Every structure is written in C-alpha cells, then in structure tokens.
Amino acid sequence: MVKECLVFLDVDVKDMDEFLETASNLIYKTKLIENRDEFHKALLEREKEITTGVGKGVAFPHALGKFVKYPFVALFRLKKPIDYKSIDGRPVDLFFVIGTPNNAEETHLKILSRLAQNFAEHEFRSELRECQDDDLIRRVLRRIFQPMVIVVHEKEEDKIKILKRFSPHINFFFYNKGNNIEPFEIHISDLAIAVDINPNNRLIKGPFSIDEVISEIDLIYKVKTTWEEEGND
C-alpha cells in the first residue's frame, strides 16, 4: 500500500506554516517527491479547504499529485504541540503526512482509512507519543500498511495453507460467514475473497478454489515484494 514509512521525532516548529515547510523539506530529501514546492503548495491548499486536524492531538496532512513518486506516510512527532485548527480545538503533536501519486486515489483513501482506524485507539496514540525507538515505530507503521486480506472459508486446512505461504507479510482476517463482515472493513482491505463457499456478500469475490485464492493473494504479495526489491525495506 505504501512504499515507505518515514519517522521524524522531536521536530521543533512553532506553527502550522513552519511545520508544513519543515515536513516538505525533510520529505523532499528522501526523494519520494519530485517537486518540493508543488508538494508544499498541495499540503497548504488542503489545509485552507478544511483542517486535517482530526482531534486528540492528531493530524493527517495529505497531498495527491504527479509530484509524488510513490505512496508514502511520514510520521512527525513534535517536541511541543502546535495550534492546527483541529476539529476539537486541541493542539497537535502527532502528524501523519501522506503522499500519493495522481493515479493512486484508491490507495490514498485506504491509507487515510487505515490511519483513522488505528488512531481511534487511545493505547496506540499513547504508545506513539512515548516510544523513543524510531525503528520500532517504523516497523509498527509498516505492519499497519501491509496488505490486508479478508478470507471467508469453512475448512481449517485452507486457513493453515494460506498462513503458511504468506504470514507474516500480509494481514489476514478469516471469517466463516461473509455476511457478518462490516462493509467498511471490506472497503479498506486489499482483497476480500471466499474459498469454496458462497460469501453471501456482493463485496466479496468468489467462491474460488483454494489454489485460485492463493493466486489472487500472490498478486498482492508480489506488488509488496517488488517495492521492497527497489530498496524500501
């Protein structure tokens, strides 16, 4: 889903303008964006439309455009919270800056959804604020943005076969009945598929044989490993 997860701790800025400038400069140095000025302008224009401060000290500034080479997420944890005109009025100290190319609108929405889902948990926010190991934070973030696959199945051996082949590189969620799955969960997944049974859910692909399901999952896994081979893991 994302090519890189960047982590910047103890960032010292005094306001929104300085933060967006600093974030744009640091991300540009990683070569994930081709044009620093266009990226910065897109972030700024997004904030003028409506704040990305979602509350509880968290903000998700984001930009989508041709100036972004690959989808990425960058965590900035500030030394001191700043006013960001958040929806709850609370100052922000945790920023997730998101960048996606023009042709990745669906990925852009999934990244935002995954972040929102995790930041709803108080424990997750607290751990990010307290952890001093940037490499550990990076590994946690990569786990969030690993491919997410929902599998509807009946046979335990099918589940075991899938896990043996792909775990821990893909986040799996196994269900016995497709109609028990929330639509939101399906929409933020990379694949929702059924093995040998009717999922009773139009949002879920299938039914397919176990070999066909593995082939479908393999396509997602190959995208992930292709990015890693380009030097991103």
Image (cartoon, helix red, strand yellow):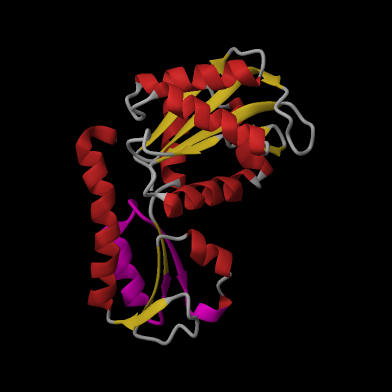
Is residue 156 among what the camera can see?
yes
User: How many numbered marks appear?
Assistant: 0
Indicate yes or no whether the magenta region holds residue 153.
yes
Q: Give the range drawn in magenta.
A: 151-179
Name the residue nearer the viewer: 12 or 173. 12
The answer to whether residue 203 is above or below residue 121 is below
Q: Residue furthest right?
A: 89
Residue 2 sits in quarter: top left
Residue at screen point 68% across, 27% down: 92
| Picture layout, residue 190 above or below residue 64 | below
The residue depicted at 21 percent of the width and 37 percent of the height is 230
- Above or below, comparing residue 168 to residue 10 in the picture: below
| Picture coordinates of residue 119, whole percent (x, y) | 62, 43
Task: Please provide percent x and percent y for residue 43.
Answer: 54, 31
Quarter of the figure with residue 217: bottom left
Name the residue at 70% across, 32% down. Answer: 57
